Image (cartoon, grey):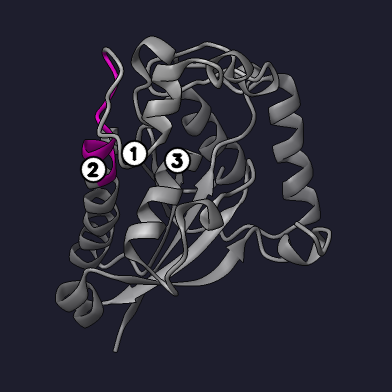
C-alpha cells in the first residue's frame, strides 16, 4: 500500500518570540536575525528532507523559514488555513502580563468556551487545523506527491497532531522547537476510514538525539 509522508515544521524565531509577546495571525512578523542564524545552524548540523513540494502558512515568518530550509523545492504552496490562531485583543502583548488578566486565564481554560474580542474561537481554530491536515494529504494523494514539507506554527502543529496523530498524546506533548517538528505519514485507507496519520520521526533528522535527556 502506497504511503504519503508529510514533515510538519515550526517556523523560526521572530523578535516577538524573543520579547515574550503573544503573537498570532494578527501580527505578521518576519524572522529576526537570530532566527535566521538559528535556522542556518540547524541546516549545517542536521539533515532536513528536501521534497519538491512545500506547503506554508501565509505569514512571513513561515514563508521565510520555508525559503531557508527548502531552497530547492520546486512547488511552494501558500495555504491560508495554515496560519496561526488570531489572538484578538491579546495580540502582541507580553505573556508575562497577560497571565495576570482574568479574561486571558479564562481563554486558556479549554472548558470555558470564552473567546476574547476579535479572536478566533478556539473550537473554530481546532476544526480548521484538523481539516487542513487531512486536506494536505488529500492534495498529495490526488497530485501523486508522496512526500512534502509543511512550514507552519507551533499551535497549529500541536492542534493537528493532538487530533489526528497516532500514537495519541496531549497537545502540549506535540510542542515543537523553532525550525523543528514531526514527520507524519498515512495511506489511503487510514486517511479515508479514520482520518488519522502516524507520527514516525522528528525533523530535522538527528535533532532529538542532540537534546538533553530531561527535555
Q: Which badge, 2 or 1, comes first in the chain's sequence?
A: 1
| Whole-number angstrom distance, CA of label 3 to CA of label 1 | 10 Å
From the image, which quarter does the C terminus lie in? bottom right
Query: Position of 141 compared to 185: left or right?
Result: left
| In the rendered image, the vertical position of residue 50 relative to residue 56, given as above or below | below
**Which residues are drawn in magenta?**
118-126
Magenta span contains residue 163:
no
Q: Are marks 2 and 3 in contact (CB under 8 Å)?
A: no
> The residue tagged with tag 2: helix, strand or loop?
helix
What residue appears at the point 16 percent right and 74 percent down from the top-left corner? 192
Corner quadrant of residue 118: top left
What residue appears at the point 22 percent right and 46 percent down from the top-left corner? 127
Report the residue marked by disc 1: 82
> The residue tagged with tag 3: helix, strand or loop?
helix
- Depth check, front residue: 12 or 72: 12
Report the residue marked by disc 2: 128
Query: Position of 192 compared to 85: left or right?
Result: left
What residue appears at the point 47 percent right and 48 percent down from the top-left corner? 73
| Whole-number angstrom distance, CA of label 2 to CA of label 1 | 8 Å
Q: Is residue 74 visible?
A: no
**In the rendering, at what x and y percent does residue 90 appear?**
43, 14
Q: Which label belongs to residue 155?
A: 3
Magenta span contains residue 122:
yes
Amino acid at each position: 500500500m502506497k504511503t504519503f509522508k508529510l514533515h510538519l515544521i515550526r517556523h523560526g524565531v521572530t523578535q516577538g518570540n524573543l520579547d515574550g509577546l503573544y503573537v498570532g495571525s494578527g501580527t505578521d512578523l518576519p524572522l529576526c536575525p537570530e532566527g535566521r542564524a538559528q535556522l542556518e545552524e540547524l541546516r549545517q548540523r542536521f539533515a532536513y528532507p528536501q521534497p519538491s513540494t512545500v506547503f506554508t502558512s501565509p505569514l512571513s515568518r513561515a514563508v521565510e523559514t520555508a525559503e531557508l530550509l527548502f531552497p530547492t523545492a520546486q512547488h511552494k504552496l501558500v495555504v491560508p488555513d495554515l496560519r496561526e490562531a488570531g489572538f484578538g485583543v491579546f495580540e502582541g502583548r507580553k505573556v508575562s502580563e497577560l497571565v495576570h488578566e482574568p479574561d486571558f486565564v479564562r481563554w486558556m481554560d479549554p472548558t470555558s468556551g470564552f473567546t476574547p474580542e476579535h479572536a478566533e474561537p478556539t473550537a473554530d481554530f481546532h476544526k480548521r487545523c484538523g481539516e487542513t491536515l487531512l486536506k494536505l494529504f488529500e492534495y498529495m494523494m490526488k497530485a501523486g506527491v508522496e512526500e512534502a514539507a509543511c512550514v507552519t506554527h507551533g499551535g497549529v502543529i500541536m492542534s493537528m497532531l493532538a487530533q489526528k496523530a497516532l500514537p495519541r498524546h496531549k497537545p502540549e506533548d506535540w510542542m515543537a522547537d523553532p525550525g523543528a517538528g514531526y514527520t507524519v505519514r498515512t495511506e489511503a485507507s487510514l486517511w479515508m476510514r479514520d482520518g488519522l496519520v502516524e507520527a514516525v520521526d522528528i525533523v530535522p533528522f538527528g535533532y532529538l538525539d542532540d537534546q538533553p535527556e530531561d527535555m
